[in-house]
Image (cartoon, rainbow, N blue to C red):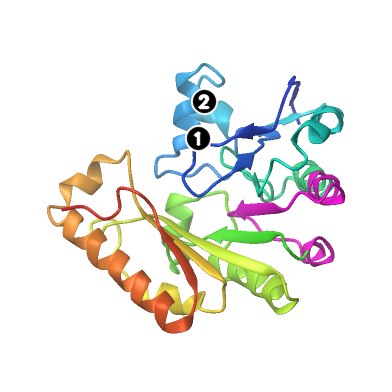
């Protein structure tokens, strides 16, 4: 695997439900076709030249050395540190990345820094041995694995992804699900209630619309569609005492 080096890793995120974050990998072999916002930004700022380069991830080789210096500076300031908003900490078939992600979580937890994880890969059951305040999340925009292959070609199978989340939940871990970017019916016709029922065991659900894709605006009723979906998520979560967050821009007039 190719490597790169960085002088710093931990930073305050601009993501609305985030606090601090770090990205110890550049690129992602999941190769999502939403299109991927992280890839768009990496290309815009010259970090990668093409999609083909993006799906060949580069690991930050000096991650642990940088964290050794940075963690003391941030102790007491971080509410939750997110892994990750510009890559995937548990990328499928990327053992080095997975091993490094586990070591990062252990080191942060050792300094009483709580972490939140989001992946389209599989969550290792070993996570249950870490700080019980950690939060482990997966992205689920469909239960149709054929559609998943089209949109997230390198990611894990949906049923296996959910199974890994449920396993941690049953071990007493805090879990969450990101239903974002949720596609309009001109991508795929599906029942949002079925997706919600498929993850009804989780502690929190985040829901958001799809952006940066012209096909969404081609669906004339997309505003009404997302308003109805958001209301359905809120109703579902309220009935089951599940925490929720509706992303900005999902509700529109």
User: In the rendered image of this protein, does residue 167 appear above or below residue 101?
Assistant: below
What residue does disc 1 label?
Answer: 38
Question: CB of mark 2 within 8 Å of CB of mark 1?
Answer: yes
User: Callout 1: helix, strand or loop?
Assistant: helix
Q: In what quadrant of the picture does the N terminus appear?
A: top right
Asked whether residue 111 is drawn in magenta, I would say yes
Most extreme residue toward the front, as rendered? 76
Quarter of the image where one finds residue 182: bottom left
- Check the image and report above or below for 198 versus 98: below
Q: Position of residue 215 (x, y in %)?
A: 24, 45
Q: With respect to residue 234, does 67 lie above or below?
A: above
Q: State left or right for residue 61 relative to residue 202.
A: right
Residue 160: x %, y % from top left = 62, 68
- Residue closest to the eye, 135 or 32: 135
Q: CA–CA distance between discs 2 and 1? A: 6 Å
* Place of residue 18 in the rendered image (x, y in percent of width and height, measured from the top left): 55, 46
Q: Which mark is residue 42?
A: 2
Q: Which residues are magenta?
A: 104-131
Q: From what the image shows, is residue 196 above or below residue 187? A: below
């Amino acid at each position: 695997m190719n490597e790169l080096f960085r002088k710093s890793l931990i930073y305050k995120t601009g993501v609305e439900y985030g606090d601090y974050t770090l990205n110890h990998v550049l690129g992602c072999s999941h190769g999502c076709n939403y299109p991927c916002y992280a890839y768009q930004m990496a290309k815009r700022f010259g970090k990668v030249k093409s999609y083909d380069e993006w799906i060949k991830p580069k690991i930050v080789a000096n991650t642990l050395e940088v964290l050794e210096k940075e963690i003391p500076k941030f102790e007491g300031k971080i509410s939750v540190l997110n892994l990750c908003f510009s890559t995937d900490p548990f990328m499928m078939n990327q053992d080095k990345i997975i091993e490094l992600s586990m070591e990062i979580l252990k080191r942060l937890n050792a300094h009483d820094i709580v972490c939140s994880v989001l992946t389209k890969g599989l969550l290792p059951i070993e996570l249950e041995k870490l700080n019980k305040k950690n939060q482990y999340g997966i992205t689920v925009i469909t239960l149709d694995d054929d559609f998943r292959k089209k949109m997230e070609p390198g990611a894990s199978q949906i049923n296996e992804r959910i199974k890994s989340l449920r396993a941690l939940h049953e071990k007493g871990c805090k879990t969450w699900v990101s239903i974002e970017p949720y596609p309009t019916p001109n991508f795929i016709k599906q029942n949002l209630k079925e997706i919600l029922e498929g993850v009804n065991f989780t502690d929190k659900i985040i829901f958001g619309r799809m952006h940066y894709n012209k096909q969404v605006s081609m669906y004339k009723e997309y505003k009404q569609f997302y308003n109805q979906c958001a209301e359905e998520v809120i109703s579902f979560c309220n009935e089951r005492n599940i925490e929720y967050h509706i992303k900005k821009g999902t509700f529109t007039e």
